[in-house]
């Protein structure tokens, strides 16, 4: 399990770009930029699957509850 700057692969976060709760799949570095690969169970063609780490914030309890209520 990879942990970087408080981010843990497999945990749920809120993506500001996608405005959704997402699961962190992997953390990568492209040059000097840190990139997170994320997924959501109802992603569409407008969903950004690679975002900057700074885009992610911890999901609240209410957001996590809504994520699991499909």
Image: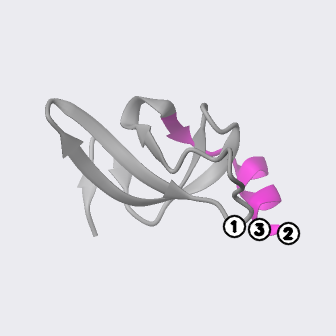
Q: Are marks 1 and 3 in contact (CB under 8 Å)?
A: no
Identify the secondary structure beneath mark 2: loop
Quickly name the residue at label 2: 70
Marks 1 and 3, the one that precedes in the sequence: 1
Q: Which residue appears at 45% of the width and 66% of the height?
A: 10
The segment highlighted magenta reads 56-70
Q: Position of residue 20 (x, y in %)?
A: 70, 45
- Looking at the image, which is closer to me, 24 or 5? 24
Vertical comparison of 17 with 9: above or below: above
Mark 1 is surrounded, within 10 Å at the Cα level, by few (under 14), some (14 to 19) or many (20 or more) other residues, namely: few
Quickly name the residue at label 1: 41
**Gap between marks 2 and 3, in whole Å?**
6 Å
The mark closer to the camera, 2 or 1, is 1
Marks 2 and 1, the one that precedes in the sequence: 1
Quickly name the residue at label 3: 68
The mark closer to the camera, 1 or 3, is 1
**Gap between marks 1 and 3, in whole Å?**
10 Å
- Left or right? Give the position of 44 relative to 10: right
Q: Are marks 2 and 1 in contact (CB under 8 Å)?
A: yes
């Amino acid at each position: 399990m990879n942990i970087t700057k408080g981010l843990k692969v497999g945990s749920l976060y809120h993506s500001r770009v996608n405005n959704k709760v997402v699961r962190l799949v992997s953390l990568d570095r492209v040059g000097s930029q840190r990139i997170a690969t994320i997924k959501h169970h109802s992603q569409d063609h407008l969903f950004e699957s690679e975002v900057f780490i700074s885009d992610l914030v911890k999901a609240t309890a209410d957001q996590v509850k809504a994520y699991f209520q499909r």
